Image: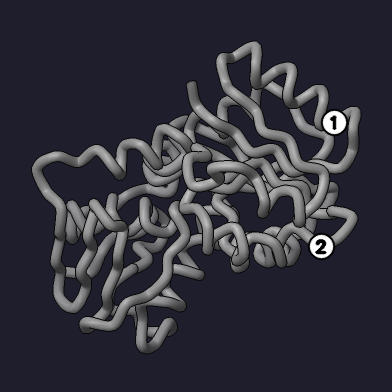
Amino acid sequence: MKQILLIEDEAGISQMITVQLKMFGFNVHEATDAKTALSTNKIESIDAIILDWMLPDEEGPNLIPKLRQRTDAPILMLTARSEMVDKLTGFEAGADDYLTKPFDMMELIARIKALIRRSGDSNEDEKITTIKYKGLTLNLETRRVEVDEEEIELTPTEFTILEIMIKKPGVVFSRNQLIELVMGYEYEGYGRTLDSHIARLRSKLEIDVKSPEYIITVFGIGYKLGK
């Protein structure tokens, strides 16, 4: 049974999400604030985290780095904020996905399933454990990433994007292809979110983001890993 950590202080929303997740076979651990979330028993065994932006004792984006010290579980943020700058703030903090309130419960379930599936797929590669390309090194088992032998920190979503592209250097992926491969399903409106992930990935990999060596934009189509 997959384990979900739900960090939400609004009782009505928390109850609604918990009931639906349990109906789909998830085990839910509830927390109403940052302090309780960080003290969750066996947090390292959590499969995915649903995190509200506004908590009584701390904002969600500020809590993410503390959660990342304890777990690599993918994080989906819930928020009433819909501006792109707010989404970028969440992604910059390390969130993997973003859902604006009010939301459709079936979409929430689909996204959680996709996040868990992506995380599991990345951990179950039995044949290849390390991929090298130019100055990049990806260890699929430890999820360690190095650029010119210097370790860099990637979110699970950033790692997934890089893993997809590094396995097929030079191949052009359309934005729709990447969205489906990364999310596990097609989601209208995820395009700008994908672009945000790409921009953050470039900022970590590239010496000059205006003249990237690794993540290349193919105008009118999508992206490729430079070859």
Answer above or below: position of 38 versus 69: above
Image location of residue 147, percent across then percent down: 27, 78
Badge 1 element: helix
Residue at x 52%, y 57% (from the top left corner): 70
Amino acid found under the numbered disc labelled 1: Ile
Badge 2 element: loop
The extreme bottom residue here reads 207
Image location of residue 50, percent across then percent down: 66, 41
Instruction: Count numbered badges in the picture.
Output: 2
Q: Residues within 10 Å of mark 1 (few under 14, many from 20)?
A: few
Of the residues tagged 1 and 2, which is closer to the observer? 2
Image location of residue 119, percent across then percent down: 40, 41
Q: Quadrant of residue 227?
A: bottom left
The extreme top residue here reads 23
Seen from the viewer's position, the closer of residues 89 and 180 is 89
Amino acid found under the numbered disc labelled 2: Glu
Which residue was labeled with disc 2? Answer: 58
Answer above or below: position of 142 versus 30: below
Viewed as shown, does residue 179 lie left or right of 122?
right
Which residue was labeled with disc 1? Answer: 13
